[in-house]
Amino acid sequence: MSGSAGAPARRIGLFMATMLVAGNLIGSGIYLLPATLAATGSISIFGWIIAAIGALVLAGVFSLIMMVRPTEEGLADTVEAAMGPFWGFHTSLIYWLSIWLANIAIALAVTGYLAALFPVLGQPEIAAFTTIGVIWALTAVSMFGPRAIGRMHGMTLAIGLVPLLAAGALGWLWFDSQMFAASWNVTGESSMSAVYGSMLSVFWAFLGVECAAMVARTVERPERNVPLATMGGVLLAALVYSFASTAIFGLVPAGDLAVSSAPFALAVERILGPVAAALVAVCAILKASGTLGGWVFVTGEATRWTAKAGYLPRWLSVTNPREIPVRALLVMGVVMSLAAFATAAETIAEQFLTLINAVVVLNLMVYIYSAFALVRLTSASPPKLRLAAWIIAILAGAFCAALLASSGWEMISIATVLAVSTVPAWWLVSLQARRRASGVA
């Protein structure tokens, strides 16, 4: 039997909720992205700025949604209330797919940093088993509940800031403006094209702006604390990103960054030597692990409410007496393990890039639906709130559409196939629901 219908006995407050958002954002993305963005150059700083603004706009979408409809049942429940059952079903499956694919990517980042310390772990077969081990270790932590995850985020956020602040602070002390200028735009394209091309990869680091809303049932006073935690977490992450990412291009040439599996460690090594670089790698491993713990917890919640809605087997919605979705966490651990093998590539970096591109595209689809849902949910609100919702929703929708367009036809085609495939799936779910209703009648 599931837990009681009431609230969990112990909820997290504003500080822990803010740490959950910031901790989910400041994770594997920022540690690996300088190497990815080196193919663009230091001009990618504008990609960071634009992506941060877009993330704040999306944070506004989710904050307003929680203000006008403080639900405890997740993002898809909100979309369904605004747009109808099919769109709730569609959003549930798309979001559910995106978050557990993201978990594999984050686990790969942990494996990658471990391989920097222990090169044998970089071999494809060993890397796959290491990644699966990381997934199960953080699944175990998630079974202790939201407070354990909140504490883990608080600790690993501070640890994770060490390499970022070290590279940032030292980078500004040893900043080489000529090196920064030489790496400005290495694409051979126009400045606008270079910045636009960098934004899809950059936005991987901002995925998670909705995570406080996703676990609203575990947050004290969600109608107040979820919006504050969402905006605060995004702002904190954006400040850290811009501070560290700008400095690193003044420490290491773009060509060297592009071939590095640990760019922040490389930057620190240039100044303080290999011992300091190893310390940075350890900090990155701990922080990426903390990020994965948060997202495994969110995955359990997403699986729980997707099953509760009838879109997955209903027994996955059952929680233990402490209202922790243990069944969902265990099943998703198996699913992610199988997917980690199925998506394996010659290198960790190749597998990571494929996964994050897919995850970003899927999330952008959900964010567009959320923006439209905000407009529908505020249709009867006071004029000022309705106007604010329209402005924020239009800006958010335009931003997401622009990023989707930059992903290329291959990714757009895959996303379209996934979206269309939910139509026959919905027909089957609806048919089963009608049969159950007839049987009861």
Image: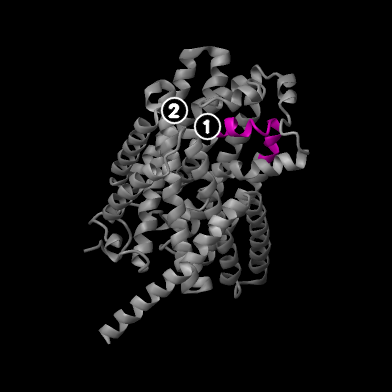
What is the three-letter code of the residue carrying label 1?
Tyr
Q: Residue at x 31, y 36 (%)?
A: 133
- Asked if the residue at tag 1 contacts the one at tag 2, i.e. Cβ–Cβ closer than 8 Å, the answer is yes
Left or right of residue 262, residue 391 in this image: right
The color scheme shown is: one colour
Q: Kindly identify which residue carries mark 1.
A: 31
The N terminus - image quarter? bottom left
Is the residue 433 above or below the residue 312 in the image? Answer: below
Place of residue 79 in the rendered image (x, y in percent of width and height, measured from the top left): 50, 67
Q: Residue at x 60, y 19 (%)?
A: 170
Place of residue 111 in the rendered image (x, y in percent of width and height, measured from the top left): 40, 32
Q: Residue furthest bottom?
A: 441
What is the three-letter code of the residue carrying label 2?
Tyr
Q: Residue at x 41, y 41 (%)?
A: 292
What's the magenta region? 31-47
Q: Please tell me whether the stretch drawn in magenta is mainly helix, strand or loop.
A: helix
